[in-house]
């Protein structure tokens, strides 16, 4: 076995030695001010978790009825704050009324420009105004037959009504399932069928770079789709509420479809928040698994709320005067936890943006930051790499001096992108929080605390309070420092998924059988000598080349560190000799010529950065990489292209279908 191969067989070969301590002034003013303070609290949180969480729950949340037991753990099923009662909408809205927060902006919304050349629309809702709208919409839901425990499917663009609908469900105890506006009618129908939703909240249409996404039409189609048994998939739906957004023509079916604004005119703004049990379901969010059927991740009330409130405040160091912007769509978990619930539970100001980062021009983000004086920006590495590709002239045009903290989420950030973000967006003064978590975890799990944790480009650093992650081998034994393995979480935490909707067996088998008595994340990871966690990527994205397992993320990182490369995705292709060969799909910076010399140079570059074993066998230049709307590269498709097999499977989330055709060479 070569030196760098570990018992788990996952190699982690990325070397990164730069360390960035928190700026002094930032640390002094921060909620958590030093590494020592973090370590002390962390020890308390894992040594006596019940005591720690009880103290937090009491201090952080408003309860209608206190809990009797902090945690009931019957592996793998957790119940937190058993016997307690509270309401999420009350904790995000009502608790701020009668305080100075009442008249502060809860949501600032920047709309997509309705037509080229037109400015984006703006809308600001104070806590008082948002409370008013949420109460009214909660009454609309009731008026349309929704009761406590019913499921409501939300299929909306990034408009304030999305947050209102979520909070209104929480207010009356209905369970929402938000489906991203980029999903197809088929996905909508499948999700309705799985959760047996009673009502859909949608819009006439949503804007996407000036074009209109026909959301209502998609819902109409979803409601006609049949399953293999010949029955309508979405037959549980009784009502459809339609927000007028894009003014496109839609057909309204009498008795079933109603307009949001007409319904709102019929109701009062008096709607007391329901008393919900701590473990009452709050939402279901579907996420793709390794099989075709999406998994309905279930989150509940008290533990989720506590955890997203605490992580929002401590990871983003939130203060009342912040203008906080998380660029995620509410259709993803990041939008749930860090656009809506976490920030609002803290009384913060959360900015929502409807459109794309390069609409109408590649400086849209920087324009928005300068316009509102955004202080905290939380976005994805894939966006950062796009900005790098578009060039520094775009951020340079704008005053970004209001920014004080930057964050990333969703995928490993390569050190080059981290450094670019640090230098060109953060002006070298803003700490960066690289936050590792998942739909399943509900909130941020491994992350720097910006006033306390020295950061290293590419590492999510250390666990949040109460979280016990470990890197283990196939038998669940902790691997030595600096060697790769599987990332697991050893103890339950308040915002963990409570299961998969209607499928406890799949919940057990996907998450709790791989490593005994541990939650299996599906990610590969290593811990360095300082205990910092370095996520290698999904285990399924770890390749075996000539007996070496190599994290594709690391090869990508090496490629992207080359001056002329904008973005790279590496996948495996079956190879007679080596088992698997590495195929790299590479996009280049503007003005760079793709030729054989560059191909050789890149292979040499990877060999230099990581080692000859990681040298891609094949490099294919592409204009763009196929991505899901959430920005994840669609590796499954790239694997099929690399292997030369026909493209199969669900491609409805592709950002740009033409990219796929071009990569496969099937475009006319
Ligand atoms: C990956 C998004 C490296 C990881 C919140 C995880 C990351 C999956 C990071 C979950 C990060 C997320 N560094 N990898 N900071 N954050 N990931 O469910 O593979 O959309 O398992 O949740 O994204 O994706 P999901």
Image (tube, grey):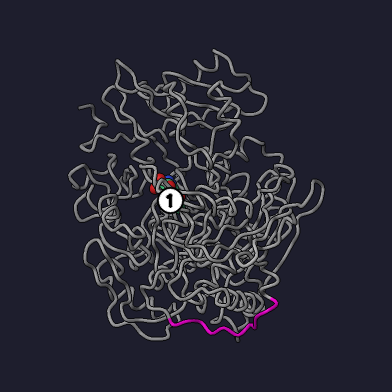
User: Mark 1 CB in 8 Å range of ligand 1?
Assistant: yes
Picture coordinates of residue 329 (x, y %)?
57, 54
Q: Nearer the viewer, residue 476 or 629?
A: 629
Q: Is residue 276 left or right of residue 124?
A: left
- How crowded is the residue under tag 1: few (<14 C-alpha within 10 Å), some, or many (20+)? some
Picture coordinates of residue 374 (x, y %)?
65, 59
Picture coordinates of residue 596 (x, y %)?
54, 13
The relative height of residue 110 versus residue 348 in the rendered view (above or below) is above
Picture coordinates of residue 267 (x, y %)?
65, 80
Q: Tell me the residue at 31%/24% (across/down).
A: 545
The relative height of residue 62 versus residue 195 in the rendered view (above or below) is below
| Outermost residue toward the top in this view | 596
Which stretch appears magenta?
265-275
Is residue 258 covered in magenta? no
- Residue 266 visible in rendering: yes
Q: Tell me the residue at 34%/44% (across/down).
A: 523
Mostly what secondary structure, the magenta segment? loop
Q: Tell me the residue at 57%/57% (across/down).
A: 155
Q: Is residue 19 left or right of residue 486?
A: right
Label 1 sits on residue: 287
- Residue 429 visible in rendering: no
Position of the C terminus, as image quadrant, is top right
Q: Is residue 146 left or right of residue 324?
A: left
Q: Is residue 324 left or right of residue 510?
A: right
Secondary-structure class at tag 1: strand
């Amino acid at each position: 076995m070569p030196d760098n191969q570990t018992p788990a067989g996952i190699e982690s070969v990325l070397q990164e030695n730069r360390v960035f301590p928190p700026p002094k002034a930032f640390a002094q003013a921060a909620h958590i001010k030093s590494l020592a303070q973090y370590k002390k609290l962390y020890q308390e949180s894992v040594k006596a978790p019940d005591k720690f969480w009880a103290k937090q729950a009491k201090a952080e949340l408003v309860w209608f009825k206190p809990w009797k037991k902090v945690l009931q753990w019957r592996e793998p099923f957790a119940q937190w704050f058993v016997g307690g009662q509270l309401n999420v909408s009350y904790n995000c809205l009502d608790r701020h009324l009668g305080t100075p927060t009442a008249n502060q902006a809860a949501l600032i919304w920047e709309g997509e420009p309705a037509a080229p050349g037109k400015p984006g629309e703006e809308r600001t809702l104070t806590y008082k105004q948002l409370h008013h709208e949420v109460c009214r919409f909660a009454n609309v839901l009731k008026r349309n037959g929704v009761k406590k425990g019913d499921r409501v499917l939300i299929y909306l663009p990034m408009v304030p009504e999305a947050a209102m609908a979520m909070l209104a469900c929480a207010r009356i105890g209905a369970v929402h399932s938000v489906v991203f506006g980029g999903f197809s009618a088929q996905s909508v129908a499948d999700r309705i069928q799985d959760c047996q939703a009673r009502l859909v909240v949608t819009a006439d249409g949503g804007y996407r770079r000036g074009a209109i996404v026909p959301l209502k039409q998609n819902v109409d189609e979803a409601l006609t789709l049949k399953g293999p048994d010949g029955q309508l998939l979405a037959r549980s739906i009784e009502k459809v509420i339609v927000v007028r957004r894009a003014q496109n023509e839609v057909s309204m079916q009498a008795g079933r479809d109603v307009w949001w604004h007409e319904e709102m005119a019929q109701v009062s703004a008096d709607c007391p928040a329901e008393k919900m049990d701590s473990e009452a379901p709050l939402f279901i969010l579907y996420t793709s698994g390794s099989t075709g059927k999406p998994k309905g991740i279930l989150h509940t009330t008290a533990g989720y709320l506590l955890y997203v409130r605490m992580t929002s405040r401590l990871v983003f160091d939130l203060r009342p005067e912040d203008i906080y912007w998380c660029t995620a769509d509410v259709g993803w978990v990041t939008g749930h936890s860090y656009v809506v619930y976490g920030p609002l539970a803290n009384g913060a100001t959360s900015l929502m943006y409807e459109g794309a980062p390069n609409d109408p021009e590649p400086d849209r983000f920087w324009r928005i930051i300068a316009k509102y004086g955004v202080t905290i920006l939380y976005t994805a590495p894939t966006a950062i790499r796009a900005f790098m590709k578009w060039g520094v002239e775009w951020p340079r045009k704008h005053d970004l001096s209001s920014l004080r903290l930057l964050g990333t989420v969703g995928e490993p950030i390569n050190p080059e992108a981290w450094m670019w973000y640090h230098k060109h967006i953060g002006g070298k003064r803003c700490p960066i929080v690289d936050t590792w978590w998942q739909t399943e975890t509900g909130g941020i799990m491994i992350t720097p605390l910006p006033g306390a944790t020295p950061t290293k480009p590419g590492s999510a650093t250390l666990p949040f309070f109460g979280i016990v992650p470990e890197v283990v081998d196939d038998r669940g034994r902790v691997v030595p420092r600096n060697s790769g393995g599987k990332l697991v979480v050893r103890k339950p935490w308040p915002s963990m998924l409570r299961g998969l909707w209607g499928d406890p067996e799949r919940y057990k088998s996907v998450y709790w059988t791989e490593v005994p008595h541990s939650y299996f994340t599906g990610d590969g990871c290593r811990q360095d000598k300082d205990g910092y966690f370095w996520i290698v990527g999904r285990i399924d994205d770890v390749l075996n080349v000539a007996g070496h397992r190599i994290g594709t993320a690391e090869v990508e990182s090496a490629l992207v560190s080359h001056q002329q490369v904008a973005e790279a995705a590496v996948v495996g292709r079956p190879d007679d000799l080596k088992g698997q060969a590495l195929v790299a799909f590479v996009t280049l910076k503007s003005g760079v010529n793709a030729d054989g010399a560059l191909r050789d140079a890149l292979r040499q570059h990877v060999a230099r950065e990581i080692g000859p074993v990681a040298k891609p066998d094949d490099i294919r230049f592409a204009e763009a990489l196929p991505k899901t709307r959430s920005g994840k590269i669609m590796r499954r498709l790239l694997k099929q292209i690399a292997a030369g097999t026909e493209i199969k499977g669900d491609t409805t989330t592709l950002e740009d279908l033409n990219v796929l055709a071009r990569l496969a060479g099937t475009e006319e």
